[in-house]
Image (cartoon, rainbow, N blue to C red):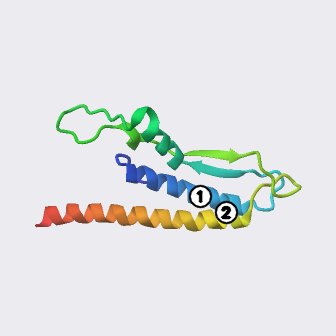
Amino acid sequence: MFQKGSLVHSALNASDLRQKAISNNLANVNTAGYKVDKVEFEDKLRQAITADGGLSLSRTNDKHLFGNGVTNMQPEVKKRLYTSVKENGNNVDVDIEMTEKAANELYYNTLIKQLNGKYSMYNYVINN
């Protein structure tokens, strides 16, 4: 949905995918045997940052500030298989999903504010 190229865009894509997964989970709250979809991004990012003592960014030109590194990270959707909330094998917990939905909305709005600030700076530089 959002352009590639920055970590903020990757995080926005992860948040967008997470919102869709949560909506799908809530829609299947009564489906027998349904297992919750969980989007993983932040944990993967944290692991990439802390692996081998920090970020390893590659640069193709000395004038470039950043390389590809973590900006190419993509979110993953995984099934939460090893929990059951109901006897029919469904593991959707509405309270957990609604809490994750609210947290994801705050996360998304924070990312949008950050991106808007970045574009406001570009706009200021271009117009002044």
Above or below for 98 versus 80: below
Residue shown at the point (25%, 66%) measured from the top left = 120
**Marking on residue 1:** none
Residue shown at the point (17%, 66%) measured from the top left = 124
Quarter occupied by the N terminus? bottom left
Residue type indicated by callout 1: Lys
The first of marks 2 and 1 along the sequence is 1
Q: In this orientation, which residue lies closer to the viewer: 94 or 23?
A: 94
Image spot of residue 102 (x, y percent): 57, 68
**Residue at mark 1:** 20
Above or below for 22 versus 82: below
**Residue at mark 2:** 97
Above or below for 112 versus 51: below
One can see residue 41 in this view? no
Residue type indicated by callout 2: Glu
What crowding class fits label 1: few (fewer than 14 Cα within 10 Å), some (14-19), or many (20 or more)? some
Q: Is residue 49 left or right of residue 33?
A: left
Q: Residue furthest front?
A: 53
Image spot of residue 42 (x, y percent): 50, 49
